[in-house]
Amino acid sequence: MHSKQTRIDAALSTAQKCFATRFNGASHMFVAGSIMRGEGTVFSDIDLVVIFPRLPQAWRESFLLDGFPIEAFVHDPETLTYFIGKDVESGTPVMVDMIASGTIIGNTTDATAMQRQARDLLADGPKPLATAQLDAMRYVLSDLADDLRAEGPADEMAAIAAQLYPRLIDFILLGQQQWTGKGKWAARLLRRFDAQLAAVAAEAFKDAVHGNRAKLVALTDQQLARHGGRLFDRYHAKAPRDARISPDRDLLQ
C-alpha cells in the first residue's frame, strides 16, 4: 500500500510540474489513469486532460517527465465539448471517464462543475442503439461468426477471432445500454457489468485463438439472438450522400 501511495504521490507531483511549466496558462487539469487508481504497472502512463480558456485548436501529445510516460489531451471548453460528443456518440466515453475520475489541479470551481457533469453523463449510460447501428453490428458479427465456422489456416482463424472478440463486447454492452471501451477497457467494463459473462467470453476467445472456435461462435450466436438473431439476408446500408468524388480528379493527388 505504501509503495502504491508513493507512486501516486510522485505521479501527482509530476502532473503539477506539467501544469505549472509545460501547460502554463491552463485553467485546470484532470490527472487520471491506472497509476492514480493504484493499479499501475511500470509501463503505465499518466493521463492528463488539460483545459485552457481558449485555444486555436485542440491537440494530443505524449512525452516523458520524471520517469513517467505522459499522455496529454489539451482542450478548451469548446473543443472538449466536441470530442466528448464524439465519444458519447460512439459509446466509448474515454475523455468523460478521465474527467469523472481524475484528480483536479488548478481552478477547482470550474473543474468541479465539469467533473460533476461528467459523472452524471456516465451514470446516465449511452442512448439505446438506433436500428441502423444495431443492424450494422449484427451484420458484422454474423459475417465474422460464419468465417469462424469455416475451415482455414490457423493464423487466419486467429485473426478473425481477434476481430470478432472486441466487436462482441461492444455488442453485449451497448446492446444493454452500457458504456463500452477501447482495447483493454472494453474487457474491464464487461467484467464490471457481468463478471461471469466476461469470464465465458475471455475463455471462448482464448480457445478460438488456439483452434477451438466452437465456444466463441456459440456465444456470438447467443448474444445475436438477444437482438433479433443473425443478419445477412436483406441487410441494407446507405452510404453518406456526400460520399462522391468527380472522376476527373486524380485520386493519387
Image (cartoon, grey):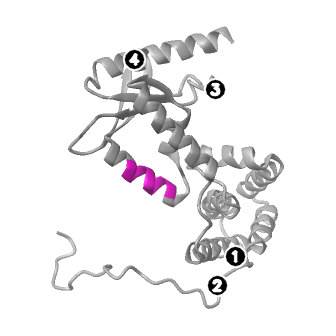
User: What residue sits right under mark 2 in the picture?
Assistant: 232
Q: Are marks 1 and 3 in contact (CB under 8 Å)?
A: no
Looking at the picture, does residue 233 appear above or below residue 107? below
Q: Residue at x 31, y 18 (%)?
A: 20
User: What residue sits right under mark 4 in the picture?
Assistant: 16
Q: Nearer the viewer, mark 1 or mark 4?
A: 4
Looking at the picture, does residue 33 appear above or below residue 192? above
Q: Position of residue 219 (x, y in %)?
A: 79, 64
Of the numbered discs 3 and 4, the one sitting upstream in the chain is: 4
Q: Is residue 86 shown in magenta? A: yes
User: What residue sits right under mark 1 in the picture?
Assistant: 146
Residue 244 is at least partly visible in this image: yes
Q: Nearer the viewer, mark 3 or mark 4?
A: 4
Q: Position of residue 211 (x, y in %)?
A: 75, 59
Q: Are marks 3 and 4 in contact (CB under 8 Å)?
A: no
- Give the residue type that dot 4 points to: Gln
Q: Are marks 2 and 1 in contact (CB under 8 Å)?
A: yes
User: What residue sits right under mark 3 in the picture?
Assistant: 39
Give the Cα separation between the discs numbered 2 and 4: 53 Å
Q: Nearer the viewer, mark 2 or mark 3?
A: 3
Q: Quadrant of residue 18?
A: top left
Other residues around mark 1 within 10 Å, as few (<14) / some (14–19) / many (≥20): few
Of the numbered discs 2 and 3, the one sitting upstream in the chain is: 3
Give the left or right position of residue 169, taking residue 111 as reference: right
Give the Cα separation between the discs numbered 3 and 4: 20 Å
- Give the residue type that dot 2 points to: Phe
User: Could you say whether the residue bearing mark 4 is in a helix, strand or loop?
Assistant: helix
Q: Which residues are magenta?
A: 81-88
